[in-house]
Every structure is written in C-alpha cells, then in structure tokens.
Image (cartoon, helix red, strand yellow):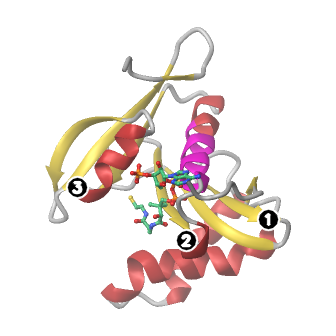
Amino acid sequence: MKPAMRFAISDLRQRPEFFDTVADRIWQAWWKADGHPLDYISSRLRENMSAMTVPFALVAHDDGAFLGTASVIASDLVERPQFTPWVAAVWVEPQARQRGIGAALVDRATRDCFALGFSRAYLCARPQRTPYYERLGWTSIERNVGQHRLSVLIQDASPETGNISRSPP
Ligand SMILES: CC(C)(COP(=O)(O)OP(=O)(O)OC[C@H]1O[C@@H](n2cnc3c(N)ncnc32)[C@H](O)[C@@H]1OP(=O)(O)O)[C@@H](O)C(=O)NCCC(=O)NCCS
C-alpha cells in the first residue's frame, strides 16, 4: 500500500498558474506523437478558462506542486457526437500514481457534471484502461469503437440526490 499523499483538487480557472503544465501534459500524453503543436493544445485548453460550464479542467496539487489533471469536455469521440459531457484527459504525474489521485480527479469531474445538471457523464478508454474505470463505478456500454478500439463508459446521477449512483456489487 502506497502512503496517502496530501492533495487538493481545484478548478484550473481558480489556479491559472498550472495552465502551462496542464497543456504540456495533455500534449505530451495524447497529441505530440501525432505531430500536433503544443500551441494547438494551449488554445483549446484556453477555452476552459472562460467557459461558464463545459468545458472545464481540474488540477490536483499539493499547494504549488502539480500532481495531475482531468477535464470535462463536450465531445471526446467523433464516432459518438450525440453523447455529452465527457470526462477526459485524466493524467497523474508518474511519481504521484497509485495513491488514489486519479480516482479522486475522475470522481470530482463526474460530480461537477452532475452539479451542472447533467444526469449522465461519459468517458472513453483504451481496452487496457477500461477495468480501472469499471472499478471506479463506471459501466461499459460499448467496446471496440473507432480505430483505437475504445470502450465507452457511463456514470449516472441518482435522480433523488444528484449524487453518483454506483452499480450494485
Ligand atoms: C490512469 C492514471 C490517471 C491513474 O492515476 P492514479 O492516480 O495512479 O490512479 P489511482 O491511484 O486512482 O489508481 C491506480 C491504481 O492504484 C491503486 N491504488 C489507489 N490508491 C492506492 C494506494 N494508496 N496504494 C496502492 N495502490 C493504490 C488503485 O486501486 C488502482 O489500481 P488498479 O489500476 O488495479 O485499479 C495514471 O496512471 C496516468 O496518468 N496514466 C497515464 C495517462 C492515462 O493513461 N490516462 C487515462 C486515459 S483513459
């Protein structure tokens, strides 16, 4: 068991000093290899800084030390344009992994979707990452979508409370 790590989760709009680091990590993890410039990600991320609702980005941090990020965006899968919103771009710094920070970021992003009035949140994941999200209470509704054979997962708000309704064990 790894020791717990002290961290807080903030909206990036409240902690703009992390903007460049979040853009860098999203670019390195998902866009650089395809030849997209960092500026492309920065300008897309900048949309998160002004939106009143979706999109928005979260940042996990220990005071001024960046630990991870997650975003909520309107559309994440071109094959499924009818679904919105999506929890996306979940990233935890390598040295901070396996301490529950990824789970906390996903949980906070999902709760924020429900607090905005959405009754269902979506997430897409590569096959090897799908069990991780299922353990966090997400339900797979489709597999092998698109060229990356992504799974589509959902989490529903419970109608009474607006809280996450987890599948029975
Ligand atoms: C995927 C990712 C975000 C997970 O972040 P994380 O902070 O390590 O996630 P968690 O700590 O919540 O969970 C990771 C594992 O550690 C375990 N864990 C959580 N707290 C723990 C603790 N205190 N001690 C030991 N293990 C722990 C979890 O049970 C989980 O195990 P599992 O994978 O068997 O379910 C991170 O690995 C990452 O950034 N990867 C690269 C980017 C990526 O692939 N993003 C996902 C795109 S879909």
Residue 125 in the image: state x and y as whole percent: 32, 54
Above or below residue 161? Residue 6 is: below
Circle count? 3
Q: Residue at x 37, y 48 (%)?
A: 132
Q: Residues within 10 Å of mark 2 (few under 14, many from 20)?
A: few
Q: Residue at x 68, y 61 (%)?
A: 59
For the residue labelled by badge 2, is the local secondary structure a helix, a strand or a loop?
helix
Q: Residue at x 59, y 30 (%)?
A: 114
Q: What amino acid type is highlighted by mark number 2?
A: Arg
Mark 1 → mark 2, Cα distance in angstroms: 25 Å
Q: Is residue 2 left or right of residue 166?
A: right
Residue 127, label in figure: 3
Residue 44, label in figure: 2
Q: Residue at x 75, y 64 (%)?
A: 61
Q: Residues within 10 Å of mark 3 (few under 14, many from 20)?
A: some
For the residue labelled by badge 3, is the local secondary structure a helix, a strand or a loop?
helix
Nearer the observer, 150 or 146:
150
Which quadrant of the structure image shows residue 22?
bottom right
Q: Earlier in the sequence, mark 1 or mark 2?
A: 2
Q: What amino acid type is highlighted by mark number 1?
A: Asp
- Magenta highlight on residue 14: no
Q: Which region shows up in magenta?
A: 100-110
Q: Which residue is mark 1?
A: 62
The residue sitting at the top extreme is 160
Q: Earlier in the sequence, mark 3 or mark 1?
A: 1
Residue 63 in the image: state x and y as whole percent: 85, 66
Q: Is residue 45 left or right of residue 7?
A: left
